[in-house]
Amino acid sequence: MIRAIAAIDIRRGIANDHGIPWQGRVPSDVAYFRRMTQGHAIVMGTGVYNELIEPLPNRHNVVATNKNEPLREGFEKTSDARAYLQNAQEDVWVVGGAAIFAATLDLVDELHLTLLDQDFSCTKFFPEYESAFEKTAEQQSITENGITFTITVWKRRI
């Protein structure tokens, strides 16, 4: 199964030029991300890769990039995220950024979205998803460090 996981603000924003604006302020979302993706392959773009100091532990870290330079130890390169997902023999999580989400959303079976209830003035966005997916689960809203959010699960409409 192919899944995508992201935290998005009220405008579907996921980041700005400096990274994730709410980074470190919503620990329950980080714990959810860790719990859901652990033991699985994760596919990321070069922006996410560049933000990481080392591979995320207990995951198969795959970076979609066309650059010829080698990746750091513990990361695997794919030049085609779509082909990688289409040929995957295991559950895979698409973890961002915006370009990878946009390029692969039509292949995703399930979304795990943390909906933040404010605008963080993001410049990078998660693609429109509500027409292709329906919400099947929603946790009770949580407020941490002044940020209220809800963790949701969406399945592709048939």
Image: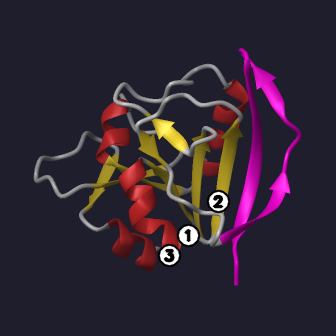
Q: Is residue 116 left or right of residue 78?
A: right
Q: Which residue is mark 3?
A: 89
Can you give x and y, in whole percent of width and height, for residue 5 in the image? 59, 51
SS for dot 3: loop
Residues under labels 2 and 1: Cα distance? 7 Å
Q: Which residue is mark 1?
A: 108
Residue 82 lies, with reference to residue 14, above or below; the image says: below
Please say if 91 is above or below 138. Answer: below
Q: Is residue 62 left or right of residue 152?
A: left
Q: How many numbered discs, if any?
A: 3
Q: Is residue 112 left or right of residue 150?
A: left
Magenta-colored segment: predominant secondary structure: strand
Disc 2: CA contacts within 10 A as few (<14), some (14-19) or many (>=20): many
Badge nearest the viewer, 1 or 3: 1
Tell me the quadrant of the picture where the C terminus can be found.
bottom right
Q: Nearer the viewer, residue 99 or 37?
A: 99
Task: State yes or no: discs 2 and 1 in contact (Cβ < 8 Å).
Answer: yes
Q: Is residue 13 magenta?
A: no
Residue furthest right as drawn:
140
- Tell me where residue 3 appears, x and y as whole percent: 59, 63
Residue in the foreground of this view, choosing between 27 and 11: 11
Query: What is the image's colouring?
Result: secondary structure
SS label for mark 1: loop
Amino acid type of the residue that numbered disc 2 sits on in the rendered structure: Leu
The residue range painted magenta reads 133-158
Task: Residue 113 in the image: state x and y as whole percent.
Answer: 66, 49
Front-lying residue, 129 or 96: 129
Q: Kindly identify which numbered label has been placed on residue 111.
A: 2
Locate the N terminus and report the quarter of the image it occupies: bottom right
**Earlier sequence position, callout 1 versus callout 3:** 3
Q: Nearer the viewer, mark 3 or mark 2?
A: 2
Callout 2 secondary element: strand
